[in-house]
Image: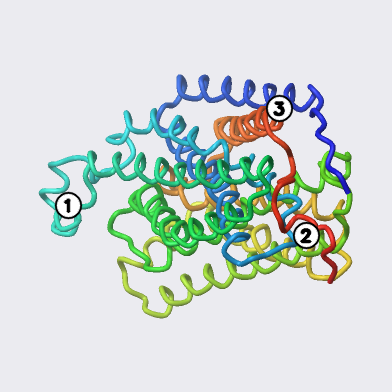
Amino acid sequence: MEYQKKELPDKVKNAGFLFAGIGLLLIAVSYLLDPRREAFNNIIGLTFFASIAIGALALVALEYISGAVWSVPFRRVSEFIASSLPLVLVFAIPLFLMLGMLFHWTHPEVVSADRLLSGKSPYLNIPFFIGRTIGVILVLYVFYALFTRNSRKQDESKEQGLTRTNVKLSAAFMPVAGIGLTLLSIDWIMSLEPHWYSTIFGVYYISATLLAGLAATTYASVSLNEAGYLIPGVNKDHYYSLGALMFAITNFWAYIAFSQFLLIWYANIPEESIWFVMRWEGGWKYISIILIFVRFVIPYAGLLSQPSKSDPKRLKQISIFILIAHFFDLYWLIMPTFSKTVVFSFYELGFPLFVVGIVILAFFYQTKKHNLVAVGDPKLQRGLDFHL
């Protein structure tokens, strides 16, 4: 079957501008009214945005390194979502200017009076902190540029060697991405409470990142296929694979989250358990309980049956729900450092709306320049013929 390139309607672009515009307005107003609170929301926005873009890029690498064929018809969707990756640094710029307001390890007098922080100062210092964030995003973007250059070149040349090149790149990408995501999670989330530590926290954020990227890819792929923008041949077996993968990573996230809690609870070491105690006081107890249902129980139940994994309507609903749950999770991770009581109002809405708008716009403009399907990939026909 032949792929026919179609232009996405302007309503997609308009929706992107609407979300981004409303989000940017709320961000500006919030920064004027309460800069410190909005800076914490900025961290949520940064880590939320990074997980969607890097998660989508990780899916591209996973396909290459695993030799999967079922995902080839919509791999380009993941590539387009990942194209927004360099804009993550835009979210970081205002935070670089406000580090002293957010992280108490940035104050020399505090560090000099604290033996633990003094020991961590070779890692937790402002120049190295900023350099790590910029370095991680730029290195991952280099991988994105190489992946997509070969993929798009293959549309014209049909050269199979480009796939082998991307397989080798994927083998290098995996450890780099794992280390990079771990650094981002330690720097922007864990170091808000620099006395606390968890050796599994990086994996916690990595699993959430994979799930966020997959949810965004699933929603876009199903919607585009239903509207006839992808190549004919994508069927319910492809949908089932997307649903099954979301189900599996949801379970993996729950396993990591429970393992972290169980080990810290069992050891009962004050410098570890205090982090969970903070999330069990001042109303945060109810947020913690709700998180269990929002992040695990509801997605698990929604994707448990075989028909639900193949139902396009259910997949779109669960994909949106998972992204909302991911934002809720980041809110639970970050905001207790700002306030001992639960706070939620229009301040918390600006960044998620802005992120959604930016991703939509980046995706729209990618479709103007490139095919929505990797038509030159030698595995494409096998991907279309895929059946369980």
Residue position marked by numbered label 1 in the rendering: 122
Query: Measured along the vertical axis of the image, is residue 256 above or below residue 372?
Result: below
The residue most toward the left is: 112
Residue 163, given in percent of the width and then of the height, sits at: 60, 55
C-alpha separation, residue under disc 1 versus residue under disc 2: 49 Å
Q: Amino acid at mark 3?
A: Lys
Q: Residue at x 22, y 39 (%)?
A: 127
Q: Secondary structure at mark 3?
A: helix
Q: Amino acid at mark 2?
A: Gly
Q: Earlier in the sequence, mark 1 or mark 2?
A: 1
Q: Secondary structure at mark 2?
A: helix
* Side of 381 where 36 appears, left or right: left
C-alpha separation, residue under disc 3 versus residue under disc 2: 24 Å
Tell me the quarter of the picture where residue 250 sits. bottom right
Q: Nearer the viewer, mark 1 or mark 3?
A: 3
Q: Can you see residue 373?
A: yes
* Side of 169 where 239 appears, left or right: right
Q: Amino acid at mark 1?
A: Pro
Q: Quick one: quadrant of the C terminus?
A: bottom right
Q: Nearer the viewer, mark 1 or mark 2?
A: 2
Residue 376, given in percent of the width and then of the height, sits at: 71, 47
Q: Secondary structure at mark 1?
A: loop
Residue 192, given in percent of the width and then of the height, sits at: 35, 48
Q: Can you see residue 287?
A: no
Which label was assigned to residue 103?
none
Tell me the quarter of the picture where residue 81 sits. top right
Q: Earlier in the sequence, mark 1 or mark 3?
A: 1
Residue position marked by numbered label 3 in the rendering: 368
Instruction: Kindly indicate whether the residue at mark 2 contacts the one at mark 3 (C-beta within 8 angstroms).
Output: no
Q: Residue at x 31, y 69 (%)?
A: 270
Which label was assigned to residue 383?
2
